[in-house]
Image (tube, rainbow, N blue to C red):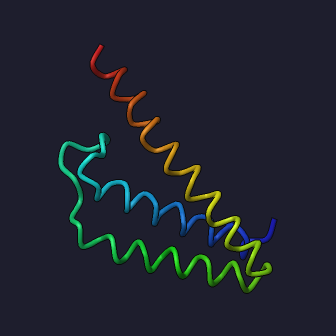
Amino acid sequence: MDYFSVLPIAIMLLAVALLYFSNKHQMVFAKTWPKQLRPVAYLLIIAAITTMALKFALSAAIFISLMVIMLSIIFLPTFAHLTKGKTNE
C-alpha cells in the first residue's frame, strides 16, 4: 500500500481524536482537552481530504473521509466505555 494513501487516513484519525478529546462528553480523560484544538482538527480534516483528492477522485476522497470519520466517532466512545467499565470493576 502506498504511504500517500495511508498518511491522509492517519491525519484524519488524529483530527477526529482531537475533536473527541476536546468534547465535554468524552470519557477517556478526567479533564477535557482545550477547545482551541478544534480549529486545528478541522484544518487537519481539510488537509487530509485535499491530499486524498490528489491521489483519488474527489468523490472517492470525500467518501473515504466520511467513512473514516464515521468509524472513528463510533469507535472512540465505545472503546472509552469498554475500558472505563473494566477499570471500575
Q: Give x and y (percent) for residue 38.
A: 33, 70
Q: Indicate whether 39 appears above or below 33.
A: below
For image coordinates 37% across by 20% down, the residue present is 86
* Numbered label tally: 0
Q: Measured from the top left, where is residue 62 in percent x and y?
A: 67, 72
- Which quadrant does the N terminus fall into? bottom right
- The quadrant where residue 54 appears: bottom right
Q: Position of residue 15 (x, y in %)?
A: 45, 66
The extreme left residue here reads: 31
Where's residue 9, x and y in %?
Answer: 62, 65
Is 36 placed above or below 76 here? below
Q: Residue at x 62, y 84 (%)?
A: 50
Asked if residue 85 lies left or right of residue 61, the reply is left
Quadrant housing the C terminus: top left
Q: Residue at x 33, y 28 (%)?
A: 84
Q: Residue furthest top?
A: 89
Residue 18 relative to residue 74: left or right:
left
Q: Nearer the viewer, residue 65 or 9?
A: 65
User: Between 79 and 24, which is closer to the camera in this rendering?
Assistant: 24
Left or right, 68 with reference to 56: left
State which quadrant residue 83 falls in: top left
